[in-house]
Image: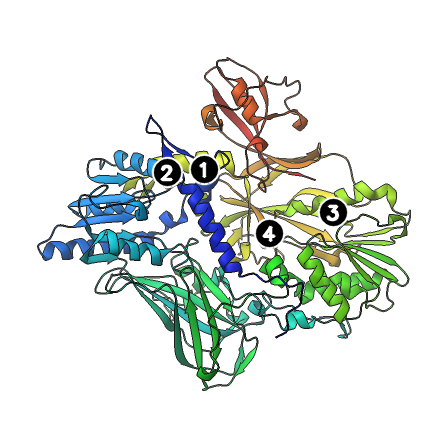
Amino acid sequence: MEVHPNAVDLDMTKVWHQLRSKLKNKILEYKMTNNNEIKSYDDEFDENQDIARSRFADMLHDTDRNQKYYLGLKAAIERMHENGKKANVLDIGTGTGLLSMMAVKLGADSVIACDGFMPAVECASKIIEANGMKDKIKLIKKHSTQIKVGVDMEHRANILVTEVFDTELIGEGAIGTFNHAHSKLLEKDCIVVPTLGTIYVQIIESPVVSAWNNIKLIADLEGDILLRPPTTVVNCPREVTVQDLQLSQLTESSFRALSEPIAVFDFDFSGADAIEKQRKSIKTIKILQTGLAQAVFMWWDLKMDVDKKVVLSCAPYWAHPDFDVNKSNDFPQNDIPWRDHWLQAIYYLPQNNVLLSENREIQIISNHDEFSLWFQIGQTEHLVLNEKPSCTCGIHLACPRSRIMQVNDSLRNKKMIQHLEEWNLKGSTLLVIGNGISLIGLAASKMEPSPSRVMIIEPNRILRTALEEFVDDNKLWNVNVKENCDKIKFSTVTHLFFEPSCVEVLPWTNFKYFNFIKKYHDNFGPHIKYSPIKATLKAVPVQFLDLHKIRCPLKNCEGFDMSKYDEMILNAIDLADPEVEVHSLWEYPCKAVGQISTLLEIDVSDIKREYEVSGLIESDNDFNGIAIWIDWQLNSNPKSIISTGPKEPIQNREYIKWSMHDKQGVYFVQSTKNQISFKFGQAGGAYMIILRIPFRRVRLKKCARSEERKKSVLPEVSNANDPRNAIHVPNFVQSLSGTTIKTFGRLAFDGFIKEGIEPGLAYVSLSSSNEIKALGFVLFAVLL
């Protein structure tokens, strides 16, 4: 296969694992001070970010997972005692200490727990003490590979319990962890919980799934082809790496199973043999029905005991052992245990759209290295791929899969094409502001009547190269792809088109479109036409079935007090996380429990310098979240709306059907109430929502980043309600040292939130006891 000279020649899996390893090493770079305090070598590493990522650990809300681990431990400890041996348990990656406390409760003779992430270890120590087990569990503040028998452990353990798995089973380094433990830390006749992991795959045909990985052609309203993918895209192996998601939320009509699920790899954690870091498995499978092989679904299960009677399954509902096919239920996917820490996965095949006939036998070739998996299909004599294929066209490297699906959405494209045709672009100059591989602008150049010139702004170098391939292959001589607006004569532009998109960012991030117009308005001619003409930010109160658990305090988990863990996570979230998160809500069922509220409406004909609206988001029932999205209106026809939210009109107390290629903003409501007030506004270049929430406190000492940070003078706040009077947190905190201050102002957390995270704001009242009394939160603030 000929590779384009500008194609990116990278093994992205290797790059990812190198980055992950680098990050892990940075996290583990700790030293002991004279006071036995553990600190990071890297002053730039903000541990609150990493703590906040675990949220309230939906893993610990996973009752099925917890109980299966309990049963596995119970069987292991009983087996050791039946054999006349002491049960000496080693818990690797203890986290909260939950599994260690289970071992104590089950009668283990000794328990050693270890973890390399220091905030987790410190928290586990507090949890263990709070549950009265301080003298029964030895906590080692090291990664397991740093532990030495005779130094850290008196003797080897004979029971290992650990949870070092991810969606790919081996992606968190499970192979290395188990091999090292058996070599250095465990007895030869030990019992491991879990004892076996098995990976399953299923070949499927699905235009929906294929749309995440393949660029399709674009046609006009009459069916005539406007744009074809170039040969570099057609011949690209695409991305064969994992795409993790909630497979159970795919509708039955969105895919066809071409095979039964089949086990392709067993990972024996018992230590009978070292686990190989790289293997290939070839299985023969019979095709159930004729179809195009477009991807494989993957999941795994764990056998928790040596008799393999206790099984923890991550299968989608149709293959899950707990699924009752005879049970009548409109939503069978909601009947199996929910978890978001271990998802299912889609892997794409390097051989695209292979036609498989019913009853044909085909080989499925499964490969793994130390951290990842990939799959092929074919005949045995053609099996030559020993290394993972990777994208050569650049699109799959530079675009998220949700964006690829979005450019393939025929209904969405139809609305935009119809609008552009109604514009009558004959002889026009069309400027398109891209949002990641904007193909609609290219298609517009082939419309009849056609524009004289099309200019597409694409700042990403890889995507510019890909767009130029489209231009050359489709002979689009009237198209120019530009990096930025430099050297553009705005006075010659007759039409400006912005392609609505919300695939990886919060909905209001795309208000940058209005900022662009505001910035260059005086440079455009007097008769320029804009599209979209309006954006409406909307919200609806919802009742999540499960997603809210990622922000829901544990309080008690399997009979153990977890309040110390709740406190740690809550503080980290307060310091590091925006109040509104981004989620693909089609994966997370939720019901509307109130009416849609309009938070803000911006019209291109009247872009104001400042916006301020307020109101109530009301519900007729308790709700645990607020979903937020934008509707973009292309022209004066209401049917021209492209929504980044629901696909269908919302019905109260019914499940919402969300767009699959857009992401929505989510605000999780901790206290149940029937209404919540909001204030939305724009001032000083920032859009923000202020949400009134219950009174609570945050101690100042948790805001300070470094005692060595240079002190500064506390700025005077003349108007507490003016967002431009924000105070820089680190300077503000340092200025309080030894000072009694009583004032009221707005505290801006932008001083120490990592790049890429929207700054959060909070109204604060300061008291002489050095506490911040938070009276309200700004949900988001996006600088334009």
Quarter location, residue 338:
bottom left
Quadrant of the drawing holding the C terminus: top right
Residue 144 position within the rendered picture, expressed as x and y whole percent measured from the top left: 30, 47
The Cα atoms of the two marked residues, 2 and 1, are separated by 9 Å
Left or right of 622: which side holds 61?
Answer: left
Quadrant of the drawing holding the N terminus: bottom right
User: What amino acid is labelled 2 in the image?
Assistant: Met
The disc label shown at residue 228, or none = none
Residue 782 position within the rendered picture, expressed as x and y whole percent measured from the top left: 65, 39
Quarter location, residue 334:
bottom left
Comparing labels 3 and 1, the label whose residue is closer to the camera: 1
The disc label shown at residue 504, or none = 4
Residue bearing mark 2: 118
Q: Residue at x 28, y 56 (%)?
A: 68
Q: Are marks 2 and 3 in contact (CB under 8 Å)?
A: no
Q: Are marks 2 and 1 in contact (CB under 8 Å)?
A: yes
Left or right of 779: which side holds 484?
Answer: right
Residue bearing mark 3: 513
Please tell me which residue lies in front, 532 or 194: 194
Q: Secondary structure at mark 2?
A: helix
- Dot placed on the residue nearer the N-terminal end, 4 or 2: 2
The Cα atoms of the two marked residues, 3 and 1, are separated by 35 Å
Q: Are marks 1 and 4 in contact (CB under 8 Å)?
A: no
* Residue at the front extreme of this rendering: 5
Q: Quick one: label 3, few (<14), some, or many (20+) residues within 10 Å?
A: many
Please tell me which residue lies in front, 259 or 713: 713
- Dot placed on the residue nearer the N-terminal end, 4 or 3: 4
User: What amino acid is labelled 1 in the image?
Assistant: Glu
The disc label shown at residue 47, or none = 1
- Dot placed on the residue nearer the N-terminal end, 2 or 3: 2
User: What amino acid is labelled 4 in the image?
Assistant: Glu
